[in-house]
Image: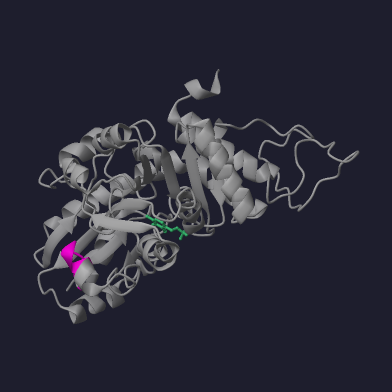
Amino acid sequence: MKKNKMKFNTKTIHGGQAPEKGYGAVMPPIYQTSTYSQSSPGEHKGYEYSRTHNPTRKALENSLASIENGNYGLAFGSGLAAIDAVLKLLKSGDEVISTNDLYGGSYRLFTKIFESFGIKFHFTSMKDASQLENIINSNTKMIWVETPTNPMMNIIDIKSLSKIAKKKKILLAVDNTFASPFLQKPLDLGANIVMHSATKYLAGHSDVILGALVVKDKKLADKLYFIQNSSGAICGPMDSFLTLRGIKTLHVRMKRHCENAKKIAIFLSNHSKIDKVFWPGFKNHPNHEIATEQMSDFGAMISFTTKKNSFKNTQQILKNFKIFTLAESLGGVESLACHPASMTHASIPKKERELSGLVDSLIRLSVGIEDVKDLISDLNQAIR
Ligand SMILES: *Cc1c(COP(=O)(O)O)cnc(C)c1O
């Protein structure tokens, strides 16, 4: 069967992959080497030096391209290294429009590193795609989108943004970390670049830091490969292998993640001590319709606030958890809880984060794939 005709659940296992030629190993071996022998100068089997190419990383990059319905995959040492490579497509004087409710590390990279190189960032909600046209000017070169947003779980309409981006000849880049390609495929919706912190759902077992980019366009891919090799923020063969292994069970994990999250979101919304629950699967979620259109399910990230709305009460709930682990990160098989205001989003000024609803009492859950009954009992005993 032609590999690009495969269904998603087959692509996660076979996409861009073939048994290895040497011994027929079904899993791509971990090519733990920095360099490759040449029979005479420049005569080699396609590999010269592992910053440029490595067969294990290549297998992962092919898999990434396959599951995101792109043509070219690139793997990096972290999600932020992948974003860093995207921003290096720009030059001093260029402007970027970004969602305002985004991963704190991305915000820090934008404002603390790239602003000092003369790139200007505008942060806006993007709830209404048409508003964007007022901010776009002749220097605007890129739109940066996270959806669902972190941690408020707003849904941004990728298709509408891509129409504007195309019209204005601006690159549209989507951080697809929260959804994973199981739920949403930004390239199919018109984005130019899809980015992942593969650290999260793709690798899926909280045991690796890795970043990814996937594109369709050859010219854009060549520019990014050039940056990847020139700046050198690649991932190692072992981490490439672990991520590749994680991807093979992505669809099975995501299905259970989503099932568990739905039950927990409903449980929380019926709880007398809970104020608001942010999860795009609710019919009254402001972007429920777009979520239904562009995602195949609603994901496993949930945020909520308590009626007490005090910092102290929130800290107590986090202490009470027995199964949910208080930790940064998300997307692993185990359930995690996090306090964005003091953890993942501490680098965003309080005033700015409260504008997007990120108050001190907000708790974010990454719902894992444990038995949901245990997870609900844990929440029940923790929220007092
Ligand atoms: C974690 C994360 C990143 C950064 O990725 P790292 O692998 O930690 O460098 C970027 N975007 C989102 C949405 C994330 O959750």
Q: Looking at the image, which is closer to me, 226 or 39?
A: 226
Ligand 1 located in image quadrant: bottom left
Q: Is residue 373 left or right of residue 187?
A: left
Is residue 90 in view? yes
Residue at image location 86% in from the left, 41% down from the top: 38
Most extreme residue toward the bottom, as rendered?
Answer: 312
Residue at image location 34% in from the left, 52% down from the top: 95
Q: Quadrant of residue 117?
A: bottom left
Scheme by which the image is coloured: one colour
Residue 356 in magenta stretch:
yes
> Magenta stretch: dominant SS?
loop
Q: Looking at the image, which is closer to me, 189 or 85?
A: 85
Q: Is residue 207 left or right of residue 20?
A: left
Q: Is residue 352 left or right of residue 81?
A: left
First to last magenta residue range: 353-360
* Position of 330 relative to 72 (above/below): below
* Position of 116 relative to 248 (above/below): below
* Position of 365 relative to 76 (above/below): below
Q: Position of residue 309 (x, y in %)?
A: 13, 73
Q: Looking at the image, which is closer to me, 331 or 159?
A: 159
Residue at image location 20% in from the left, 42% down from the top: 133
The quarter in which the C terminus is drawn is bottom left
Q: Looking at the image, which is closer to me, 116 or 316?
A: 116
Q: Position of residue 318 (x, y in %)?
A: 28, 74
The quarter in which the N terminus is drawn is top right
Q: Position of residue 62 (x, y in %)?
A: 57, 36
Residue 200 in magenta stretch:
no
Is residue 71 in view? no
Q: Quadrant of residue 41?
A: top right
